[in-house]
Image (spheres, rainbow, N blue to C red):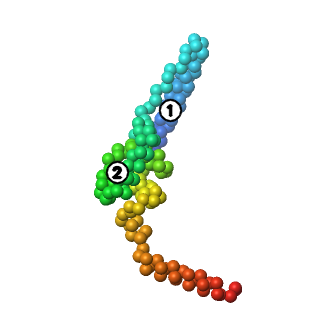
Amino acid sequence: MTDFRSPSEEVARLLAEIRETRASLQLIASSLNGIERHIRRAFQVPKPPRVRKMPSHREVGNAVDSAELLSRFDLLRMEYVQSDSGAFNEALHQFSDSDLRALAKELGLSGAGKASVFKLNDWITQRVRESALLSGSSMLRGSEERTRELPPSNLSHAAANSADAVDRDEKKPPS
């Protein structure tokens, strides 16, 4: 007999050895845990405080409270309404990544913890735009201004066409 094995046989042997080692370590850990519990009960030793892992950048609590975030959002909205898009974008880019995530969560945007900074900027810009439109501000810019303002001649023509369509529908005999 020869001691040489094929690569697949060697991998299978190593995997079996890893399983045995893992089972042995689990048995040792459970025995050690049982001994520790017995000593704690026998001598009334309190459990040590848990050591917490370091939170990731997404789990870190924000030092900015919700009132400050909402006031900063209002300032962003004022910047959006009163100035050009360059100044608004500059004000938006002044936010840190964690503040953007906190603001997005405060505004109720789902998925803010996993979204990219570019996506967060886009979502917050949309919320600022919606807020400006809902607040009744007369200052609109860009595409909002063009879509909101139709020339009066087009409005009266569109209203006349819709009135004619209603009249035609009323004159049709029921089917």
Q: Total of numbered circles in the picture? A: 2
Q: Nearer the viewer, residue 148 or 34?
A: 148
Q: Name the residue beneath numbered marker 1.
A: 22
**In which quadrant of the rendered image does the N terminus lie?**
top left
Q: Residue reaching furthest right?
A: 175
Give the quarter of the figure containing the C terminus. bottom right
Q: Residues within 10 Å of mark 2 (few under 14, many from 20)?
A: some
The residue indicated by pointer 2 is 92
Q: Considering only order in the chain, which callout, 1 or 2, is on the residue closer to the N terminus? A: 1
Which residue is found at the position 49% from the left and 23% from the top?
49
Amino acid type shown at disc 1 = Arg
* Horizontal and vertical percent position of residue 85: 32, 58
Q: Farthest top residue?
A: 43
**Visible in this render: residue 149?**
yes
Answer above or below: position of 72 versus 134: above
- Residue 36 position (above or below residue 57): above
Between 118 and 150, the one nearer to me in the picture: 150
Q: Distance between the residues labelled 2 and 1?
A: 52 Å
Residue at 47% of width from left, 46% of height from top? 106
Query: Measuring 44% from the left and 32% from the top, which residue is drawn there?
Result: 53
